[in-house]
Image (spheres, rainbow, N blue to C red):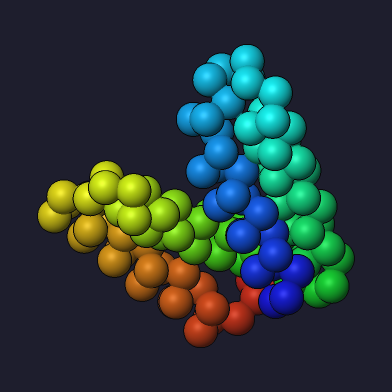
Amino acid sequence: MFYLAIAIISEVIATTLLPLTNGFTKFFPSVGCALGYAAAFYFLSLATASGMSSSTAYAIWCGVGIVLIALVQAMFGKIPNGQVIMGLLLIVSGVTMINLGGNISH
C-alpha cells in the first residue's frame, strides 16, 4: 500500500503541474510533470509487483487521485458544484467497496 500511496501522490503532483506546462512549452513545469507521471507509473508497478492485483491498484489509484486533484483545485478557488461533489462521493464509496472486497482473483 506504501508504493500505491507514492504513486497517487506522484500522479496528483503531475496532474497539478499539467496546466502550468502550457502545452509542454514551459520547461520546468513540463519536466516536473513528466517526472511525476513516470514516478506514478513506476510506483504503481511496484504496488502490483508486491502482490496487489492490477485492477484493485488501478481502481484505487484513479479514484483517490481524482478526489485529491479535486481538493487541490478547490484550494486554488475552483470549487466543485453539487453534481461534482456527488460524483466524488460515489468514487470514494466505490474505492472503499473495492478495498473492503479485497483483491480480485485471476
Which residue occupies 70% across, 23% down? Answer: 27
Residue 55 visible from this viewpoint: no
Which residue occupies 70% across, 76% down? Answer: 1
Please tell me whether residue 32 is drawn above or below residue 54 in the rendered image.
above
Q: Nearer the viewer, residue 45 or 27?
A: 27
Q: Quadrant of residue 59?
A: bottom right
Where residue 25 sits in the image (x, y, percent)? 63, 15
Count of labels in the image: 0
Residue 58 visible from this viewpoint: yes
Where residue 45 sits in the image (x, y, percent)? 80, 57
Q: Quadrant of residue 38?
A: top right
The C terminus sits in image quarter: bottom right
Which residue occupies 66% across, 54% down? Answer: 10
Please tell me whether residue 89 is drawn above or below residue 74 in the rendered image.
below
Where residue 90 sits in the image (x, y, percent)? 30, 64
Q: Nearer the viewer, residue 24 or 63?
A: 24
Task: Name the outermost residue toward the left.
Answer: 82
Left or right of 65, for residue 106: right
Left or right of 94, for residue 17: right
